Image (cartoon, helix red, strand yellow):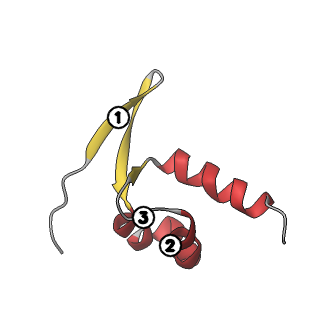
Amino acid sequence: MMAVKKKTAVNEERKEELFTLEQLIAAEKFGNRKDMLKAILSDREEYTISEVEKRIEKFMKGKVK
């Protein structure tokens, strides 16, 4: 497994690590939502865990067309 550099972002009063889409898909935490992550996140951006959780929640509450 390759070593991966992690960036940090100041998010309000605490620091949260940023992750790529690839890292999030590989994480056990989101193992059952890989397809959803691919649909709602961009592979060109980095996200915090809390940001991903908010996007998943928003997606799940969305209306079916």
Q: Is residue 38 left or right of residue 53?
A: left
Residue 28 image offset from top left, x and y in percent: 46, 70
* Earlier residue among tags 3 and 2: 3
Residue 15 image offset from top left, x and y in percent: 38, 32
The answer to whether the residues at label 1 and label 2 have Cβ atoms under 8 Å apart is no
Secondary structure of the residue carrying tag 2 is helix
- Of badges 1 and 2, nearer the viewer stands 2
- Residue on which disc 3 sits: 24
Q: What residue type is labelled 1?
A: Ala
* Earlier residue among tags 1 and 2: 1
Secondary structure of the residue carrying tag 1 is strand
- Residue on which disc 2 sits: 38
Q: Which amino acid does label 3 sit on?
A: Leu
- Residue on which disc 1 sits: 9
Secondary structure of the residue carrying tag 3 is helix
Q: How far apart are marks 3 and 1 (CA)?
A: 17 Å
The answer to whether the residues at label 3 and label 1 have Cβ atoms under 8 Å apart is no
* Earlier residue among tags 3 and 1: 1
Q: Toward the viewer: 63 or 18?
A: 63
Q: Which amino acid does label 2 sit on?
A: Lys
- Of badges 3 and 2, nearer the viewer stands 2
Residue 20 image offset from top left, x and y in percent: 35, 59
- Vertically, is 60 above or below 11? below
The dot on residue 58 is none
Q: How far apart are marks 3 and 2 (CA)?
A: 10 Å
- Vertically, is 8 above or below 45? above
- Point 35% across, 44% down: residue: 17
